[in-house]
Amino acid sequence: MKKKVLIVAFAVVALVLAGVAVAAYLRATDTPDAGIDTELAGVSVMTATDELPTTTEEQPVETVEEPEEPEEKSEGPCWLSFGGNPQRTLARENIDLGRPTRAVWGRAIGFMEYPATFCDGTLYVNNAKGTTFAIDAENGDLIWKRKVASLMASSPAIAGPRLIVSSHDGTVTGLNRANGKVLWRVGTAGRVESSPVAVDNTAYFGSTDGRLFAVNVASGAVRWAYDTGGRINSSPSIWGNRVCITTYAGSVACLRRSDGNELWTTYVKRDLLRYESFYASASTDGQRLYTTSRAGKIVALNVRSGAIVWTRSMGTTGYATPAIADGRIFVGGFDSQLRALRATTGSQLWSRNVGGKVLSPALVVGNLVFVSTLNGKTVGLRVADGKVVWRHKLGAYAPGIATRNRYYFSLNGFLAAYKGRLSPRGTR
């Protein structure tokens, strides 16, 4: 009799455990609702004629001025947004400056997690305390600065005569590039760590409230908003009429840029019961999207269909957006390794220990790739084989950008211009 009771008890326990397992599986494989948001709850849009909320050091804007197009200067090409272009490739393959040789100038900016942007001879950069700076690229002189918010971790986007700036207080602000005056401000229901990108008079950015926004660069008016159902810390990338974003819910979504309608959404599984989680942005070469999950999985997806082409595990924490150049992608991780992978297959070409954890993306300039480490170093390596050819004792997050004349490195609170060994003759 006791034996029968025990058998029945074990059977009941087994059924309960099976039910719990099934429930856990269903919860884990359930995906959040997503779609166009027409209600725009918690969203506000103010122009310079409204009473804009001000912060310390910020002066109210008295009049609405249509910005003039900045005067063009010879140094280029422009680096208009985080990643250098709407694809977020983080690369200038056709510029060969050679190994950095000496600093031309340096300016204290304060802590910068994201690098500067550049056009028409001017660098634009945000510091962590919420101030945006416009710096003369030739000599490092301050052109203007504007206290925009309390905290910023993003790169400003250049949109013609306007500058688009995002902040952790949940706002995205349009500034006059010439003088830093506030033109408009959009408020969201979350934080905005996403670095904006502007194409065809529209700026795109994500909010931690889960929505991807498209706004008019002239007025800040919301063209559309898409609720992904997952927290967004990443920056959108654009290819043609596609705008793509990654989320903490494990999704990678591509929308039609013109109206925000979904083209495809792919959820990436970590294991049987969990989805991946993405802090890193997606970068694209027009054929595949590349991104890195926080658990360290590098993922390549078909940009047209969203099908997963390949994955590769780093076996460590990953936060870095992949840089793309010459048929390769470059990704660092918390194991102190910088990796070069073949873009088509994900096969590893080389891996190099750079002496510290890598949180931020690499920068490719010609035949060199640069990366900064959390222990305060910047390293330059050869693209071909990963051999270290240059080291700097400062650095931590994204290493910087490059033009045809110089490097502009972000070095622990200092923005510094460096001449390369192959910089054009006559470059100071």
Image (cartoon, rainbow, N blue to C red):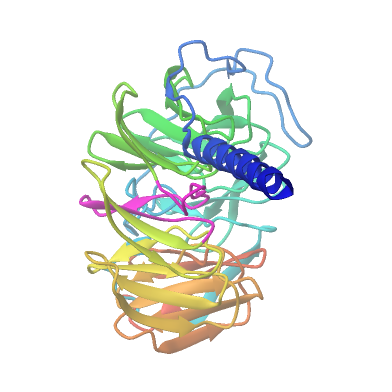
Examine the image and state in which quarter residue 322 appears: bottom left
Residue 316 at x, y percent in the picture = 54, 69
Look at the magenta stretch and give its main secondary structure. Answer: loop
Q: Start and end of the magenta stretch?
A: 268-295
Looking at the picture, tell me which residue is in the foreground, 358 or 30. Answer: 30
Looking at the picture, tell me which residue is in the foreground, 31 or 418. Answer: 31
Q: Is residue 425 left or right of residue 21?
A: left
Q: Residue at x 50, y 49 (%)?
A: 278
Residue 363 at x, y percent in the picture = 42, 67
Q: Residue at x 65, y 43 (%)?
A: 13
Residue 291 at x, y percent in the picture = 40, 55
Is residue 290 rendered magenta in the image? yes
Q: Residue at x 29, y 83 (%)?
A: 384
Residue 226 at x, y percent in the picture = 43, 24
Looking at the picture, tell me which residue is in the foreground, 314 or 15. Answer: 15
Residue 190 seen by the camera: yes
State the quadrant of the N terminus: top right
Examine the image and state in which quarter residue 380 appears: bottom left
Query: Relative to 26, is 342 above or below?
Result: below
Furthest residue toward right: 56
State the quadrant of the C terminus: bottom left
Q: Residue at x 60, y 13 (%)?
A: 49
Examine the image and state in which quarter residue 317 appears: bottom right
